[in-house]
Image (cartoon, rainbow, N blue to C red):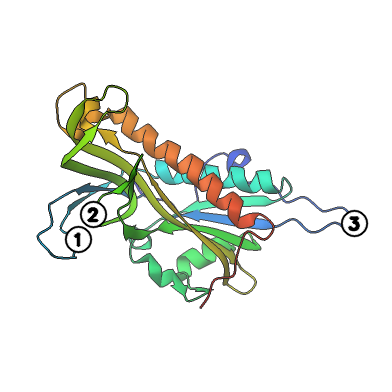
Amino acid sequence: MKRRLVLALAPALLAASARTPAQGATPARAYAVVSLVGDQLDIVVYQRQTGSHLDSNRHRQVMLPDNALDVVALRAARAALKAADARASVDLLTGSTPDLFTNQTRFFDGGQLKLPPELEAAVRQSRPTHLVLLTKYHADARLRMGNGDIGSGKLQGLGFYIDRDTVLVLGDTGGQAAGFIAPFAYIEVSLVDLATSTVVGRTVIVETRVVSAGRSVEGTDPWDAMTADQKTNALRGMLTEQVQRAVTSLVAPGGAAPVAP
């Protein structure tokens, strides 16, 4: 399915018409929100390291057939923006070409936004005052456990981390099982003042959930510890909760700290 630049969903769902502010009132912001995180899943399989600091894990990219996860992220961002200011107008966009989902650090030059021409034109079409941009965040694997973090190598975007070796203790039964699966969301959220193309705030989402292979009802492999629906719902839940939280923090008064060049 071809990925479209502007989502063809109901206008009432995706965009709110700008309202004329009362005389003397502060003009409402007009936002464009772009999500460029949901083109694929990264399936990361843990491999024991042999002394090197390089990422020795196996990575397999699974391309997604549509932009469903980007839509989830966009809806979450819109909900946060409207909760912060009901008068704000919000236009939602996602990527149309595969190259927009790779090498996303090129979109920034220090504290300045540098979008590709096609995306720049689409963003500015409705003359927004601000842009909320969701891109993939690349960082160390930090899989949260009750007594600290585990994991090795790097994670980026959306996906699942699979470890078939580490033994975990099931908290409710005290039993032990080797291996786990961990859905993850590693996303950077940037707030841009489009009058100057300046990044005025930035925050990251590093969200994981560890599920022991002992939870599997189909066998002992960690991949089977979650059904297909559970995997999908885990990613959707992470996006909804964490994107709302991140966007809320960025647009709150005093919440968007300037980004150093």
Badge number at residue 81: none
Pinpoint residue 238: horizontal percent, then vertical percent. Answer: 43, 41
Is residue 167 visible in this depiction of the protein? Answer: yes
Is residue 16 visible in this depiction of the protein? Answer: no
Task: Point out the image quarter for the N terminus.
Answer: top left
Q: Which residue bears the numbered disc 3?
A: 23
Pinpoint residue 233: horizontal percent, then vertical percent. Answer: 38, 32
Pinpoint residue 110: horizontal percent, then vertical percent. Answer: 48, 76
Vertical arrangement, residue 251 with respect to residue 234, above or below: below
Residue at the far left in the pictured view: 50
Q: Is residue 232 left or right of residue 54?
A: right
The first of marks 2 and 3 along the sequence is 3
Pinpoint residue 91: horizontal percent, then vertical percent. Answer: 59, 52
Q: Tag 1: residue type?
A: Asp
Q: Which residue bears the numbered disc 2?
A: 152
Q: Tag 2: residue type?
A: Ser
Vertical arrangement, residue 202 with respect to residue 237, above or below: below
Q: Tag 3: residue type?
A: Gln
Q: Which residue bears the numbered disc 1?
A: 55
User: Mark 1: which secondary structure?
Assistant: loop
Residue at image location 58% in from the left, 72% down from the top? 198
Around disc 3, counting alpha carbons within 10 Å, would you say few (fewer than 14), some (14 to 19), or many (20 or more)? Answer: few
Res 230 → quadrant = top left
| Residue contact at pointers 2 and 3, CB within 8 angstroms | no
Residue situated in front as seen by the camera: 36 or 154: 154
Residue at the far right in the pictured view: 23
| Residue contact at pointers 1 and 2, CB within 8 angstroms | yes
Mark toward the viewer: 1 or 2 = 2
CA gap, disc 3 to disc 1?
Answer: 58 Å
Vertical arrangement, residue 240 with respect to residue 37, above or below: above
